[in-house]
Amino acid sequence: MLELKTFNRDSVIAFFAACAVGLLLGGYALFFETLPLEWAVLSLLAVLFVFFVMIVARIRWLLLAVVLIDIPLQLQNTLFYREADADYGAIGGINVSITLMALVALYALWWAESVAQPTRDKQKIVIPTFWPLVSYISIVALSMIVAVDKQLAFFEIALLVQMFLLHIYLICTVRTRSEIIYIVTMLLAGLLLESFIMVAVRAIGHTIEMGPVKLRIDDVRVGGTIGGPNTASGYLGLILALPISVIFTNLRFPYKWLGVAAAAMGLVALILTQSRGGFIAFALSLTIVGFLVWRKGWVSPAVPIVGVLVLIGALLLLQDVIVPSRFSSVNDDAATGRLPLLVLAGEMIRQNWILGVGANNFVPTMWGYITPRFSREWLYVVHNNYLLIWAETGTGGILAFLWYLITTIRWGWRTWKLDDPLLSVLALGITAGILGHMTHMMFDLFNSRPLVQALWVYSALLMTLYNVQQLSEQHEVPGEYSPSLKTILRLR
């Protein structure tokens, strides 16, 4: 009898991929004419994606690239979409994205590898964020008991479970410096691509829709493929410290030039969002990175001054596309209009401090709290992520979420203190970005997939940096391995 272990793993995967392509092509041919345009395009992308996987030798690397670049691109469709609730800021449905497709394939590949090579990857790793995230998701699920609209609650639970599986996969499977460099390269490539898209949309001057892809601009504020301008600024404010930190690593010059290009274009894109919260997040993360690398003696005191001059120059070059009133005063309608939402969230918390009002149930619940004083106010989900989590999931939910954030920052700082010329510097950029992001959470809404995915991927990458550094002490000389960009990007 032929045992399973005698099969070549890639051959087995190729066989199942061929079956999947056949089934998808057959179903696509049968139902193409009945599909809406968005689903027709997404289905075609799925078929082409599986076919491409069949002919690429390094399948896992391709799948990781898809997951990472899709953070800003948002190639997805939404099941059970509820536009009326989404218009007020709720999660409007279940996302079916290429990230989800790639994640399923990654787990299938992981399982196949564990069956074919059961003794592989037995090194000890740490997952400090496991229990904080399990606690948080469990409390979110528990809040479904009190939710007025249980379908809306399920939408958020589905999103969190998907991101949790991605988070765990990255921590458990990334083992080498070359994988870390590849992940960082893909994150920077996604940032650079999205920045070019946002600049192009601003030049065109109007929103463009192509099937499941929407290139968005609101008047003069650009959101790109990520969503609204505030959502785009949340992504940019979180990730921009990473390309800056790459410049201070011991990587080869092509990586550093990629970091320079991504940081420069990302800054332009951030300016085009005209988001004050995004600027605050970026300024804080940049200050943290600049101060700590200066403390290490890696830059002269003149460098921060040059950086400020570059920022001022960028603002002057783009002054024609910036609305001065958004930055000249905090007493405008956009800022003051959010204050009643804080009061509304506070009242929900006061009356439902144990279990909250239910995950993703701020919108259907808020109508019961509307009094005559709110009759002329702008109504939306509260623009404070901490208050939103507290109101929807209760005291336990916000404590678990803070536990997760604090754990992430703690391990980021711990990795920075290891003084690894590659991993520690990357950890500094990621940790600084998350600290800026945590500040931004006090001013905006962060419940959409790109922001949840970006944060959970970032925190997973921090844990991975620490684990790889510990493993490298046994198997590698820290910092000496820096593959060429051509080697990293080669898929065959």
Image (spheres, rainbow, N blue to C red):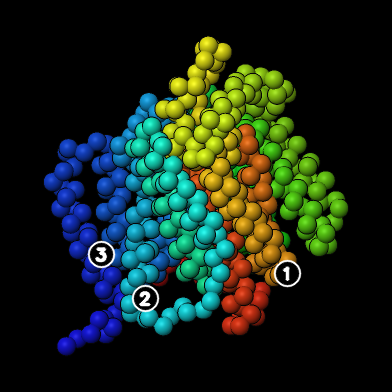
Residue 419: numbered disc: 1
Q: CA distance from mark 2 to mark 3?
A: 19 Å
Q: Nearer the viewer, mark 2 or mark 1?
A: 2
Who is closer to the viewer here, 422 or 202?
A: 422
- From the image, tell me which residue sits under label 2: 114
Q: Residue at x 61, y 68 (%)?
A: 466
Residue 17: numbered disc: 3
Badge 1: few (under 14), some or many (20 or more) residues near its Cα, within 10 Å?
few
Q: Earlier in the sequence, mark 2 or mark 1?
A: 2
Three-letter code, disc 2? Ser
Three-letter code, disc 3? Ala
Question: Is residue 201 placed above or below 130 in the rendered structure?
Answer: above
Quadrant in which the C terminus is drawn: bottom left
Label 3 sits on a secondary structure element that is: helix
| Residue 45 spot, x, y in % from top left | 31, 49
Q: Residue at x 30, y 37 (%)?
A: 80
Q: Going by the image, does 164 lie left or right of 305?
A: left
